[in-house]
Image: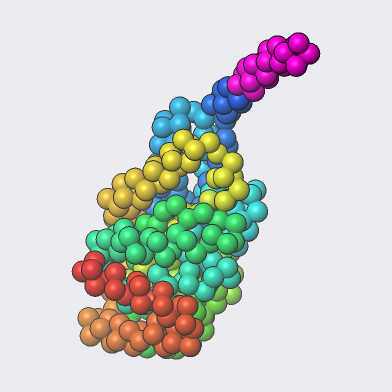
Amino acid sequence: MKSMRWASVGRPAAVGGAFLLSFVLTLAAAQAQDKTYVMKISTPTINAAPDAFARNYAAALGKDSGGRIKAEVYPASQLGSIPRQIEGTQFGAIQCEIVPPEFMVGLDERFEVMAAPGLIDSMAQAQRLAADPAVLKLMLGLGAKKGLRGIALFMGEQSEVIARTPIRHLADFKGKKIRIFASQFQSTAFERLGVTPVAMSLGDVLPALQQGAIDGAVAGVQVFTGMHFYDAAKYITMTHQPAIFLIVELNRKWYDSLPKDLQQIVDQDAAKQSVAINPQAVEIIDRGKKGWLAAGGELIDLPPGEQATMLKTLSSVAEDVSKTKPALAAAYQVVSEAVRRAQ
């Protein structure tokens, strides 16, 4: 009888405990469904492909999450220089950054592989390259051990060179001090053209040009126009090298804190928008060219023979730089094979 009495008392307690646990889990799930997650998206540019992607991505996230993800876009380095944006995303002050991957070489030298000179010869080829599964697997996984989660890669535009005095011939490069991205590929390439390369974050370039600290800078025409660089220099030489790809990185802890359904939305929307941006990126470049000319600037093409000579001079940079770096050489091999598939 005693054992039966304990059993009869214990059973309702067990049932009550199970009910309470179920109630708590249901309540927690409901609270997770109601919670709003803020995503700060940081870009270094304005009126260019990175911030266009950011706006499109923010709108898609808001719609597809039913407002549970509140994305805020901060263009033009409002949250700090590119190095600060990278650090902010690593450590969680920023949830999402969109930058050229070569600025992240301090985290992993393979991030610069997409900046290899002569890698692509057209926007269309570059867009196909950015969508290649092997390239995506490589690039989006590089920050995994550095507090980051890569979710998208897309083509911004080809590089051009702005200068205070016109660069009309290869010989005009010699002796100039030109801002480059943080990439040994770029520094080696411009050294071969007789340039003194200076790695610099985008937010510092315009004042450096205005003050005469540098003679010119590498970036895209859409960036030069959108950020009113024509106030400091009027000449853009259309070198088209190297390509400027953009990588989209999240703070990994923030991503891991999301419910599974929101993680899927974050990933899927990023993948969709990295393809949807392609025609818009081309339109932005065209607007940038027209805007530059309308502001009194000049677009300069090197003579065809000199353009070909420049490409030949730069063609071996990637192999020469990476041959003593096994990890970078392996990454370059992956990308090179994808380039052939993208032709």
Please determine whether, in this image, residue 18 is positioned above or below residue 171: above
* Residue 123 occupies quadrant: bottom left
Bounds of the magenta span? Answer: 1-24
Residue 119 position within the rendered picture, expressed as x and y whole percent measured from the top left: 32, 74
The answer to whether residue 221 of the structure is visible from this angle is no
Looking at the picture, tell me which residue is in the foreground, 170 or 51: 51
The residue lying at 43 percent from left, 63 percent from top is 139
Label the magenta part by its dominant secondary structure: helix
Does 327 appear in magenta? no
The spot of residue 309 in percent (x, y) is: 28, 87
**Which is more toward the observer, 323 or 101?**
323
Question: Looking at the image, is 253 positioned above or below residue 168?
Answer: above
If the image is split into quadrants, where does the C terminus sit?
bottom left
| Residue 60 shows up from this direction | yes
| Residue under the image location 55 percent in, 45 percent down | 255
Quadrant of residue 302 within the rendered picture: bottom left
- What residue is drawn where x is 41% and y is 78%? 330
The N terminus - image quarter: top right
Could you say where residue 111 lies in the image, as x and y percent from the top left? Answer: 48, 69
Instruction: Estimate the x, y position of residue 98 in percent, counting from the top left.
Output: 48, 54
The residue sitting at 58% across, 70% down in the picture is 106
Q: Which residue is situated farthest in the front direction here?
A: 1
Q: Is 15 a magenta residue?
A: yes
In the foreground, 240 or 270 = 270
